[in-house]
Amino acid sequence: MGKIIYYEDKNFQGRSYESSSDCSDLHSYFSRCNSIRVENGNWMLYERSNYSGHQYFLGKGEYPDFQQWMGFNDSIRSSRLISPHRGTHKIRIYVRENFRGDMVELTEDCPALFEMFNYHEIHSCNILEGSWIFYELPNYRGKQYYMKPGEYLKFTEWGALNSKVGSLRRVLESY
């Protein structure tokens, strides 16, 4: 079971809200979120209500200010508890839309897509097993996109504005 505590101010100060499940509108509890404690589970936070806007993946730990989770601002409006996948992970990434062009199949994390495969962009992917997070920049930095198993024929289907992917990581039981 997951547990997360949101705080209005930095360093775990101000009003707080504790949750053990998904929340589609945190705005009803407070207007800003500047620090978070994740006591259990993996969570995906969203900049806007109803699971939209910038996404931030947080594992167990303390985040005393929004820059610690690579936040662009203090706006967290919704969150989801990410169910861990205990089996293997497998993803196929393609350099063109609709599963065309060069393809690479991965079963492990990739901290630098360009260094390993000479790819700057992914236009489509097929997630065969497990969940993954795409990061816009190498070394798990930049905008993040949570990807469940399924077919993504173009980058807009995972919520991106462009096809730039610098790294990708499996969602494991805990971080």
Image: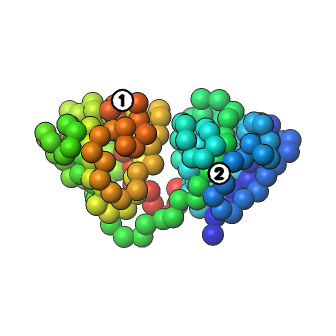
Spatial separation of the CA atoms under disc 1 and disc 2: 25 Å
Q: Earlier in the sequence, mark 1 or mark 2?
A: 2
Label 1–label 2 contact, CB within 8 A: no
Residue 25 vs residue 84: left or right? Answer: right
The quadrant where residue 4 appears: bottom right
Q: Position of residue 6 (x, y in %)?
A: 74, 48
Of the 4 image quadrants, the one containing the N terminus is: bottom right
Q: Nearer the viewer, mark 1 or mark 2?
A: 2
Q: Which residue is drawn at 37% across and 43% down?
A: 157
Res. 24 mark? 2
Q: Residues within 10 Å of mark 1 (few under 14, many from 20)?
A: few
Element at badge 2?
A: loop
Q: Where is residue 84 in the image (x, y as percent from the top left)?
A: 48, 65
Q: How crowded is mark 2: few (under 14 residues within 10 Å), some or many (20 or more)?
A: some
The residue identified by callout 1 is 162
Residue 136 vs residue 53: left or right? Answer: left
